Image (spheres, rainbow, N blue to C red):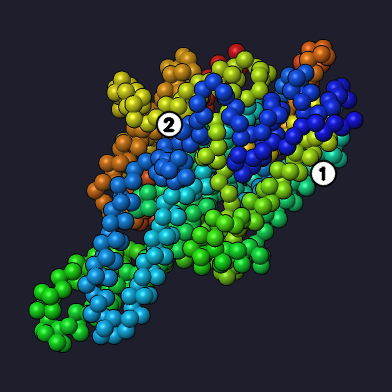
Amino acid sequence: MLHLGVAEPMRDCEYSQISTRSSTPMETPFKKRTPKRRKWQAFPGRNKFYCDGRIMMARQTGVFYLTLVLILVTSGLFFSFDCPFLSVKLTPAIPVIGGVLFVFVLGTLFRTSFSDPGVLPRATPDEAADLEKQITNCSSSGYRPPPRTKEVVINGQTVKLKYCFTCKIFRPPRASHCSLCDNCVDRFDHHCPWVGNCVGKRNYRFFYLFILSLSFLTIFIFAFVITHVILRSHQEGFLSALKNSPASVLEVVVCFFSVWSIVGLSGFHTYLISSNQTTNEDIKGSWSSKRGKDNYNPYSYGNIFTNCCAALCGPLPPSLINRRGFVESDTSQPTPPTNGITMYGSTQSQSHMAAATPLMQTETVILTNEGSLPGRTSLGGPCSGALPLGGQPTPPTSNPNLSSDSDMLPLRKDHIDGLHHHHTDGGHHPFLTPEEAPSPPGMLPCGSPVGHSHTVQGFYNPASQDSLHEDSVRGLVKLSSV
Amino acid sequence: MATEFHNLQELRHSASLANKVFIQRDYSEGTTCRFQTKFPSELDSRIERTLFEDTVKTLNNYYAEAEKIGGQSYLEGCLACTTAYIIFLCMETRYEKVLKKIGRYIQEQNEKIYAPRGLLITDPIERGMRVIEISIYEDRASSGSSSGSSSTSGTSAR
């Protein structure tokens, strides 16, 4: 007999939650004793949040401000110095079109930079434990597949799903872990320092529209500044024209150097969209016919038009990480089956807390544990000049308890992040090649500017690295099941 | 059925969580959101196979509807682009509308079918659209041995 005595929980966020714990509406805080915390404050990844969780960016945002300054200054100079002359001499449509382009560029830039790229939330402790159980059960049987991978057949193509050690999930197809932001991102394209965020499923179209409109704006400004100088030099001579509008020189220089990379990037991404590939897949050559005669892209819709429409006008999936929701007071219902899981869960949340407050705790961890890292052999990347990081597997026996292992995780990532940061300071990188976090196939590619060639062969995980890591994780599982 | 619950309140008061079953995603048709309809062995004694499969199939249909690429989604996309996405401040996307429908459907299924059998479905959106989490409750009043046997039989069956 059904007795509908429960009031439907009111929705504070967009998603309803079946709450068996209380029948009070969700808007009243769960904890009455401690102040409410929003979920973004407890977010385990390495992101920065602004405006109470409405804005989400990567940790390093310096280059984003550079992008913003370049666009604002160049456009500002254009509108102040060149447009008055041109609108009188030629047509007032010029500043109007320029203005529209400028607003569009800024709008798409902000949308790309501030929105959630499609971050996959980390597994809950119960989920992680269930997966661990399945993995150890599978590999205890006779046939032993490569650990921590699952194979699925998608539209006739076999795709390997990798297990992410940080997020404790099997990554969906086309997802990848961004080591800079320390998140798994769905349909991960690349991490773009110029927009200060990852580019993934939810903001790819904004990114594409940004670089497309920026190409148009750059070409537009470039063309009309040149026109301005030419028209002026008809009147006054070339040198005095330059003297009278010095801003034009700066604009031409900026535009000239930007136009090649931006237009090139737009062209590249137009190709990617029309073939429905991500930068990640293109660089690895996942679907190229060179890999095999039967290799094709299972995600493509078959024709360019549909691929473009799907990428640009398809439905926009919602954010999965609910940044502005409230953290619940207790994490889950009492007593899951084995004791080990609660222990596991609590150390996980500790390590998440450590990652969420990036500065204080992990830096001290780096200082104390620094000595242990350089001794690791680098796990053979094909780059001869590879950064001496290796994949840094945790040694099998030196982690007697769980808490030291959870300390190691943020340590490794910060170490990688620190070195990677050095690497990007020097060069002009339109984008960084995507990388995998400490999981064994973690050969970090050297980020050459439009580095296509080097990562293809190196991405496969040799069995030796994997078994080392697998042993350490098996140790973990054994400890947690005590 | 071993346990009878009249509503979700009773579940809370008298039940303890025995186990959780996770229905994983089915990627055989690509990256669109689909869940496997394979019936997990832990639920064998708790619910009829057809009811479970109906629930999962209906959820799959909802997600397919949300992610469908067709006339309406193109229109919405183009309209949003031309208004510089400001329109989303006032309007809900189709995906969000369908997600709300899914939330209501899951609530209804829980109340009508799953809670009376001591089960609870968590909306996949709470778990990052990765799994459908079904919590299995045991009545505290009943003997502890039944919960022990169901979880061990579940693990040995794998």
Q: Which amino acid does label 1 sit on?
A: Asp
Find disc 2 in the rendering and name its residue.
Answer: A356
Residue sitting farthest toward the right: A1
Pinpoint the chain carrying mark 2. Answer: A
Q: How far apart are marks 1 and 2 (CA)?
A: 41 Å
Q: Which amino acid does label 2 sit on?
A: Ala
Q: In which quarter of the image is residue A276?
A: bottom right
Q: Residues within 10 Å of mark 1 (few under 14, many from 20)?
A: few
Residue sitting farthest toward the bottom: A234
Q: Tell me if A199 is positioned left or right of A385 in this view.
A: right
Q: In the rendered view, would you say A337 is above or below A59? A: above
Q: Tell me if B61 is positioned left or right of A437 in this view.
A: right
Q: Position of residue B115 (x, y in %)?
A: 80, 30
Q: How crowded is mark 2: few (under 14 residues within 10 Å), some or many (20 or more)?
A: many
Q: Position of residue B80 (x, y in %)?
A: 54, 63
Camera-side residue: A156 or A192?
Answer: A192
Find disc 1 in the rendering and name its residue.
Answer: B54
Residue A135 visible in the current orientation: no
Pinpoint the chain carrying mark 1. Answer: B
Camera-side residue: B13 or A392?
Answer: B13
The residue at the point 10 percent across, 84 percent down is A237
Q: In the rendered view, would you say A44 is above or below A456? A: above
